[in-house]
Image (cartoon, rainbow, N blue to C red):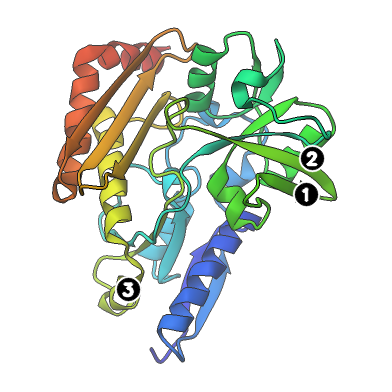
């Protein structure tokens, strides 16, 4: 390219880290390519004193970025795929899904030199747990109805500071974000502002992840063939299949931050795509789950079929109750 490639990004530490990582990879793949980052503020970055579920807006962290793409102010954007609405605006496309990292949630507690905690099951009776996710809250309430769940907003460092100050006994965070920030070590230890914490992975069997958690999605204009060609080497076939299956599940259910739902797809050793999904009530008293198997080539169809199965099992009534409340 004769001019720099402009990469639009949110200004959060995590968004910048992810964008810089993808920019570095592109520079390595295409020697001589010049990439400049342009920081764009989104509604999700500006509204920090309200729970995400109460804001009532899908695409809180992406609308302004997508508009910048459509206005030709930027050439591409790197998103945490779980932040993306299930529908991509006309004129845009998800050009690449780089290889997924851990999709799991982790339970984060201060490191007080105690022995190994048995994860969520080992929390004390009535422990205060911080999360702004209805998905996490629903599954936690179903698992541990005694826990005191409270909203927590802000970037990762802010949340960890609140944990260190004793405002919470534990936090639920995404392993991928902590890892991409360079905070999470392989042994589960992490440190922020000189304070040590321990992160315990929560198995997917205990807490299904958010749709496309741990996955990045790189978006650009659908007719920008130069950028599409540059991004093509970043696309990971298995990750694309899992993301498409999970996003199709979300699209069929028309879910957003206001609805407790989850989906997780993974390829089995024999090549089969295995998709699990969940829809639950906000209080966790009703949870509908299901699984679907098939070919990765039919990823979106599998996600849609799983959603239809859950709707038939009772998810439609749950969704109607949540949306109507």
Q: Is residue 155 above or below residue 207?
A: below
Helix, strand or loop status at disc 2: helix
Q: Tell me the residue that label 3 is attached to.
A: 233
Alpha carbon of mark 3 to alpha carbon of mark 1: how far? 34 Å
Residue 284 visible, this orientation: yes
Q: Which quadrant of the rendered structure holds the N terminus?
A: bottom left
Q: Callout 3 environment at 10 Å: few (<14), some (14 to 19), or many (20+)?
A: some
Q: Residue at x 48, y 47 (%)?
A: 102
- Numbered label attached to residue 289: none
Task: Residue under label 2, please give it.
Answer: 161
Q: Earlier in the sequence, mark 3 or mark 2?
A: 2
> Quadrant location of residue 321?
top left
- Image location of residue 223, percent across then percent down: 24, 70
Q: Is residue 40 left or right of residue 122?
A: left
Instruction: Tell me which residue sits at (39%, 9%) in the image.
Output: 286
Is there CB contact under 8 Å for labels 1 and 2?
A: yes
Asked whether 268 or 32 is in front, the reply is 268
In the image, 319: left or right of 3? Answer: left
Which residue is drawn at the image coordinates 26% and 11% (left, top)? 314
Q: Which residue is mark 1?
A: 192
Distance from disc 1 to disc 2, alpha carbons, whole Å, reads 8 Å
| On screen, residue 78 above or below 307 | below
Q: Quadrant of the C terminus?
A: top left
Estimate how packed mark 1 is, as few (under 14), some (14 to 19) or many (20 or more) residues with alpha carbons within 10 Å: some
Q: Secondary structure at mark 1?
A: strand
């Amino acid at each position: 390219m004769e001019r720099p490639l402009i990469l639009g990004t949110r200004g959060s530490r995590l968004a910048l880290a992810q964008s810089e990582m993808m920019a570095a990879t592109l520079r390595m793949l295409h020697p001589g390519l010049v990439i400049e980052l342009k920081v764009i503020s989104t509604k999700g970055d500006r509204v920090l004193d309200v729970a995400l579920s109460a804001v009532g807006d899908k695409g809180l962290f992406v609308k302004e970025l997508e508009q910048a793409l459509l206005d030709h102010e930027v050439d591409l954007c790197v998103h945490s795929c779980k932040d993306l609405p299930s529908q991509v605006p006309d004129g845009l496309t998800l050009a690449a899904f780089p290889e997924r990292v851990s999709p799991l949630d982790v339970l984060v507690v201060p490191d007080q030199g105690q022995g190994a905690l048995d994860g969520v099951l080992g929390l004390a009776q009535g422990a205060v747990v911080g999360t702004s996710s209805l998905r996490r809250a629903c599954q936690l309430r179903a698992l541990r109805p005694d826990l005191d769940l409270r909203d927590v907003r802000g970037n990762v460092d802010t949340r960890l500071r609140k944990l260190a100050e004793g405002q919470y006994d534990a936090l639920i965070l995404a392993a991928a974000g902590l890892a991409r920030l360079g905070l999470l070590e392989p042994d589960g230890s992490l440190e922020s502002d000189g304070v040590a914490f321990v992160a315990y992975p929560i198995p997917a069997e205990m807490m299904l992840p958010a749709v496309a958690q741990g996955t990045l999605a790189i978006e650009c204009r659908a007719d920008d063939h130069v950028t599409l060609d540059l991004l093509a080497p970043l696309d990971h076939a298995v990750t694309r299949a899992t993301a498409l299956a999970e996003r199709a599940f979300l699209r069929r259910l028309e879910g957003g931050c206001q609805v407790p739902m989850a989906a997780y797809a993974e390829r089995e050793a024999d090549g089969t795509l295995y998709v699990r999904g969940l829809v639950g009530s906000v209080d966790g008293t009703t949870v509908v789950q299901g699984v679907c198997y098939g070919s990765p080539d039919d990823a979106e169809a599998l996600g849609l079929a799983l959603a239809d199965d859950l709707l038939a099992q009772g998810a439609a009534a749950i969704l109607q109750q949540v949306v109507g409340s």
